[in-house]
Amino acid sequence: MEKGESMLNWQRVLALLFVAFTLCSLTGCWDRRELEERISVVAIAVDNAEQTTSKAKYAISIQIPIPTRIAGGGEGGGGEGGASSVQVMTSTGLSLHHALDNLQKRLNQELFFGHVRILVVSEEVAREGVREIIDFFRRDPQVRRQMGFVITHDHAKDALKVFTNLEQVPAVYLMSIIESGGRRDFLPEISLGDFTVCLSTPFLDPMTYYSKIGDSDFSWNGLALFHKDKLVGTITERETWLLMHLTNQGSGGNILIQLKDHEKNKNNTLIINPGTVKTKTKLNVSDGHVKARYDVALEVDIRENNTTYQLSNLKQLQEVSDLIAEQLEREAKQLVHKLQKEYGVDALQLGLKLKAYHHKEWKKMVWEEIFPNAHIDIHYDVKIRRTGLQTVN
Amino acid sequence: MLTKPKTRPNHNKKQAPESKVITPRQSGSLVASTLLGVGVLTMSRTLAETVKEAAWLVTLLGGLVSLFFLLIIARLSFRFPLKSIASYSEEILGFKQGKNKQRRNWLGKILSFPIVLGFIMYWVLTVAITVRSFGEVVVSALLPTTPLEIIILTMLILGFILTCFEIEVVARVNELILPFIAVPLIIITLLALQEFKLEFFLPLWPDISLKDFCSGILLGTFSYIGYEVMTVFGGYTFVTKATLPITVIAFMAPVLIYTAVVILSIGVFGIYELNQLLWPTLELIKAIEVPGIILQRVESAFLAVWMAAVFTTSANLLYAASFLVKKVMARGSTFVYSLLFLPFIYWVSLIPQNVFTLFIWTEKVGYLALIFSGALPLFLYIVACVRKIGLSPAKQLDNTEANGEG
């Protein structure tokens, strides 16, 4: 149309110059780094440095996947997976990053932390405090909030050397234990981001996964509970599931119940699979005295029944569900007692509830001191929904 | 469609620029996209520092306070249809124009000069702060080895390119870009809902003093810097009672988005973690788990889109500033003046030594904003009403009809 008229000649020249300028200046990315030009770290493990070796505080191990060994379907050379598909390197330093920098000296390419999936810290280190370790992860923009954070009972480095044939990269295997477990409510979903949120919030106590490493495997073993940034205690997986019930985080895994046999007076096993959990929490605050009541409504399926109880008998079924409720209730109370008196860790996150719903009273109290003496009552209501395809027994 | 409305822009250069008209929707998107800018990345932290869990309330109230000022600016445009602040501040402060006598309004020129100069300086400063904040975010979170100067320069050059064009082009660009800014923000707030924890968000009213709350509202208004471009772009659109709803909606949409972002930031992190995050909104995006592993780094995708938001903010303000100079000088074109501003903006944007100095500067610019987008228009409006300058409310209604075709 009238395009030509409206645009003067010199404007055209100017536009052309701009196009030329942008073409020249935008040909590539300033920060471009080819994949092979950097070393992607997938897992970091933190141990205490052995006292004999210099003044170093931490011994840091990193796991680096070797791309050529992993790619290509793994039919051929890389197929055996295991040790050859990754490399584990260890270095020591006064801090986490210091150790990583020391490690960098031995590597031909730049370390890249954008793919770190999991941070493993040994219990020994965690008892002294993890704030120093986490600081780097909070500052680095490449690090993802969703990455995993695990405390190991043994040497953290060993976690990086757990080779299975199920996954080629051990870090991926560890992470998928956590991720898939979290997805099916087998364990609570906790990421490093969740941990740091609790760490920053003065009335919340952080917690994260606790694990044990065998000769050739890795197993999830409950939760590590922290006060501030120091590990103060651990709870078993069974206790973790009860905690999940209380905090409405999911159903948890199967629970083994021991029931007394009618005739022989010996314990027989019954395995329940919790379906849905609904927990109602009632909080009562008066004069700085906190009363909490948990009503857990649990729907379970029976997975295995080695007792003499006839589950098809309604009366006996009711009896069984009462016995289950009783046992869970007792154990949950023991757990709360442990949290209050032994660890002094508010893993129930009652403080958060107080802040939200009883703000005025909460402001007046020092929750740390109040929590161990809070009156916490727990009630389980168990309903057996399904007993499987068998009617006898 | 076939017969062009008279008020439609035509390409005749000789015509006075103020007779060109941008559509109400365009002027709405101008306001919305100008104020959606760098503020969104930090405001949840700055507000939570002062008013804790009430940050969302303060965001909303700050928005309403800003809306009040926007309405004042709109009312000024009612009185002086198709005029920008450079013209009407002259009329308001100068001699009253007689019916026929064309007296030279030297008094108005002298009195309005500091106001217009102040606006220009304030906008230039805002552009500098905006591009610097943008550069800081990009360097610290996305492109760690790219020099800050390059990022700032690229953004400024982009803004300069926009000033080479007519005002309707600016309006259309804004109209086009706005969905690209607003939609991702809305998606992010929706995705973040899954991480939302009610206990972090509550209580609705934390125990804070009234003084803190008021200063919180003040800080809340700072997030909405940019709507005062209406004092310039209002000169190109019939802001009347009929088009007012569009302006209000255009303003309230960002307010609601901002409020949602603050609500979610508090609900996901809690105020204590929020206080420790440099760019909380960016961190909020990082906390989101997008289903599937296709999108693992949503924050870089967001930053790429957000670049457009920063562009519209800085370019619109740069345009407004250069336009005012053009009006005062009564000659030249906007791109010449914006070219003169660029080195100055570049220099100013590099003065803050670090991001924390930058945050202090940002706050100070916020107070300037309160003067220029709040107090000054209010003052001008009151003077105009008292001196009965401009169209009286009865006559303003006539405009509604004229606008019917625009």
Image: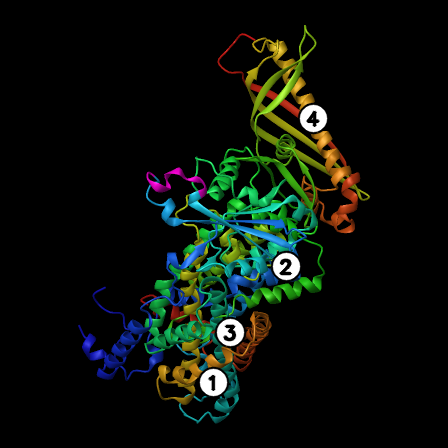
Judged from this view, the residue extending furthest toward the top is A263
Identify the subunit bearing mark 2: A
Q: According to the image, label 4 marks what residue?
A: A329
Q: What chain is tagged by disc 1?
A: B
Where does the C terminus of chain B fall, quadrant-wise?
bottom left
Q: Secondary structure at mark 1?
A: helix
**Label total for image:** 4
Give amino acid for label 3: Ile
Same chain, labels 1 and 3: yes
* Residue type pointed to by label 1: Glu
Q: Amino acid at mark 2?
A: Leu
Q: Which residue is mark 1?
A: B91
- Front of the two marks 1 and 2: 2
Q: Chain of mark 3?
A: B
What is the distance, in whole Å, between disc 4 and disc 3 at their CAs? 59 Å
Circle 2 — which element? loop
Q: Residue furthest left?
A: A1
In-front residue for pair A295/B122? A295
